[in-house]
Structure formats: C-alpha cells, structure tokens
Amino acid sequence: MKTADVVIIGAGIVGSSVAFHLTELGCRNVLLIEREQYQGQGSTGKSMGGVRAQFATPVNIQMSMFSIPFFAEFEERVGMPSGYKNHGYLFVANNEPHMRYLRTNFALQTKLGLKQVELLDAQQIAKMVPQIRVDDVLGGSFCQSDGFVDPHLVMTGFYEKAKLAGAELWRSTEVTGIQTDAQGVCGVETTNGFVATRNVVNAAGPWAAGIAKMAGVDLPVHPLRRMLVPTEPFAGIPERCPMVVDMATGFHFRPEGLGLLLAYAHDDEKPGFHTNFDHDFVEKVLDRAITRVPSFENLAVNPKRGWAGLYEVSPDHHAIIGPAPGMKGLFFANGFSGHGVMHSPATGLLTAEWVLHGEPRIIDAHSLRMERFAEGRTLDETAVL
Ligand SMILES: Cc1cc2nc3c(=O)[nH]c(=O)nc-3n(C[C@H](O)[C@H](O)[C@H](O)COP(=O)(O)OP(=O)(O)OC[C@H]3O[C@@H](n4cnc5c(N)ncnc54)[C@H](O)[C@@H]3O)c2cc1C
C-alpha cells in the first residue's frame, strides 16, 4: 500500500507551491494527485497572471508583499523563470468615492511598508499611458512592483523543484474519497488505489468544496465563471504598459505578446461550473474599453480566441488557508477569489507551515482560517476584479 507524509489534492499552481514549500522545509515524502493528464488545466491555465499588492486588507497586502518579491527572485530560488514583469497596476478613478477608496488603501499599504505605491493625478496618468482618456479622471494609484507572471511557468517551476527534492505526482488520478478514523484523516481513495496518510492538503481550486465534503466538512467556496479575450497585435500602447483598471466599469487590460488581454468583472454571473465563452462578452468588453481608451476602437478581436475559466470564490473574497475545523489532518489552500496565482508563493509556505509546524510563521495568517465565518470575523476584500 502506498503511504505518504502529505497528500496534496490538485496539482495546479497552489498544489505545486505547497509541494515545493513542504520539500524546502524538509518534508520529502509528498504525493501530488491530479485527475487531469496534464497540470494546469484548472483555473491556473485560464488566469490573466496579474500580481498586485494594491489590496484593501492587511492580510492580502502582506500575502502579496511576500509573494511578489518571490516572483522577482523565482529563477534563483526555484531554478526556472516566473515570467514576472514589473509593469505595475494602474487604478483609474473618475469619482470621489473611488478616489477616497484609493487614498484609504494607499495609507494602509504604505503603513504596512509597501514602498512602490503612489497616488497619481490625471496628468501623471496621461503621461504614463497617453491613450487613456482623462477628461473625467480625478486620479489614480500605481504600484511599480505590481505586474504579471506566467502562471504555467510558475506552476511548472514549483513542481519541477519539488520533484527534484523527492515529491511525486500521480497524473490522470482522481481522488474519490477521504478516509478518517478516531485520530482524523487516515488516507485517500483514488482511481489508482488507496494512499495512507495523516495529512491531506485540499488544493482543488474551484472543486475544493467537493473535496472537503469527502471528509464531511462544508467549505464555503463556489465556482464562478470569468471570461477574458486576447486581441490581435496592437502597437498603440506604451511598451511597458501596466495593468490598467478603470474603476468606473471594472474594465481592465494588460499587454500580452504583441496584443492585449481584455477583461471586466461581469458581476451578473451565477455560481456554477460552466465555462462556455459567450461571444457577446466581446462587444460588452469593447464598449467599456473604448469608453476609457478611445483608440481601442481600432482593436481587432477574434471571439474564437476568448476563453472562460473559474474563480474559486469565498464569502469574503479572501483565501481560506489552514486546518479544517473538526477534522485533524485536513488542510485548506482554497477560496482565492481571483488571487490564487499572485498569492501562490505565500499560500504554499503558509500551508506547509500549518502542516509541519502547526502554525503559520511568515505572516500572521490566522485570520484566513475557516473558523472566521462561524466566529463572525470575516475580512471583506473589496479590491476584487
Ligand atoms: C479568467 C481568470 C482570470 C484570472 N486572473 C487572475 C489573475 O490575474 N491573478 C491571479 O492571481 N489569479 C487570477 N485568477 C485566479 C487563479 O487562476 C486561481 O486562483 C488559481 O489558478 C487557483 O489555483 P489552484 O491551483 O488552487 O486551482 P486549479 O488551477 O484549478 O487547480 C486545481 C486542480 O485540482 C484538480 N482536481 C480537482 N478535483 C480533483 C480530484 N477529485 N482529484 C484530483 N485532482 C483534482 C483539478 O484538475 C485542477 O488541476 C484568474 C482566474 C480566471 C478563471
């Protein structure tokens, strides 16, 4: 019978980071289990790859302040590039409540030691990205160390380094059950046989609630479709264009290859696992795009190149990281609500610390435990795209 010190369910960017950090901390008998033939077919492969520290709550800012420097040094630490580009995130506000919101967040971010964030006026925004229409803009905020990574490269880097240190990956293997005894978790049932273990990490992304249910735990994470569309090559923006977020409409874009990636937060979505791409998304996103960047009326977009993936959403839009209440040996690394790529380094280390040391050490992440919902201590992140 196969035995492992830790079984990780799901080998996307989060499961791979957990495996990497466990092995870095000296735990080498680690088994990743992935039901797909290839890694990255869940949310990781659908992500926009944005990374930012411009959040509204201390724990999210701290997660990013750990993770972004990690991406910058990824190649030295992990042995493969992360594709990190520090083009920044530029939030653009055209009304006073949004400006007030940015000022409040700026004060919190700088208090926590984020050095690169700055508040800009409309002229500074126009200088940074001259194509943006600023006649109604009051100002914005920009953080140079924000930017983008390549999620697939990061996932692969974490996994390959973990593998060198002894971690194993079972592909095309589905976890179908979690067995428990009087001491807690005692193993997982899979389509490849039973694995005995006392520690299971749930890294199943949008499918996390189903995994928790296998151990009798109700995990409040639901899947929510998000769509993106790439454009054909477009030369009309600066070479180092940041991720631009028009707060008025939720429209955001960033450079990708020779073109752009376009998206907006379509809030009318209902929870569910469907990932069909609606072709009318293209018209909706372009309407919003042209409102803020008039020259985008010349963008060429092939709707067939658009895609949809799933956010894994928690009730307060914060990750749920740590031990499962009432089930010894089950750990969550779930519920990122659109931030699982950017927070994957911090999540991997925090989870490894919970498993091996019984507490998070790099930052005080007790607030991310699932108990917060029962105890009425939810966090409420509002800077969600
Ligand atoms: C359109 C879109 C844009 C996004 N943009 C960003 C962004 O800009 N920045 C950012 O930080 N995040 C972004 N995200 C969110 C980010 O992609 C996710 O938070 C992140 O990828 C979650 O990683 P994961 O490893 O937890 O999940 P996944 O990548 O979904 O991995 C979970 C894995 O578990 C496997 N699995 C599930 N059930 C089982 C089972 N029973 N047995 C075995 N294996 C199983 C799945 O096959 C899957 O491979 C975006 C998401 C989408 C959809």
Image (cartoon, helix red, strand yellow):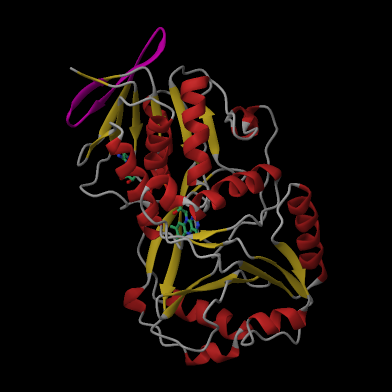
Query: Can residue 271 be seen here?
Result: no
Identify the image quadrant of residue 228.
bottom left
Span colored in magenta: 179-195
Residue 338 image point, x, y percent: 52, 53
Give the position of the C terminus as an image quadrant: bottom right
Vertical placement of residue 297 versus 141, above or below: below
Question: Does residue 104 appear in this view?
Answer: yes
Q: Is residue 56 left or right of residue 194?
A: right
Residue 101 in the figure: left or right of residue 26: right
Q: Where does the N terminus fall, quadrant-wise? A: top left
Q: Is residue 63 above or below residue 280?
A: above
Magenta segment main secondary structure: strand
Compared with 309, 4 (above or below) is above
Residue at 43%, 49% (x, y): give it. Answer: 76
Residue at screen point 34% across, 34% down: 9
Q: Whole-percent x and y of residue 290?
A: 57, 86
Q: Is residue 42 left or right of residue 379?
A: left
Is 191 within the magenta? yes
Residue at the extreme top: 182
Quick check: 251 left or right of 35? right
The foreground one among 21 and 252 is: 21
The foreground one among 96 and 366 is 366
Residue 113 horizontal/vertical position (percent): 73, 49
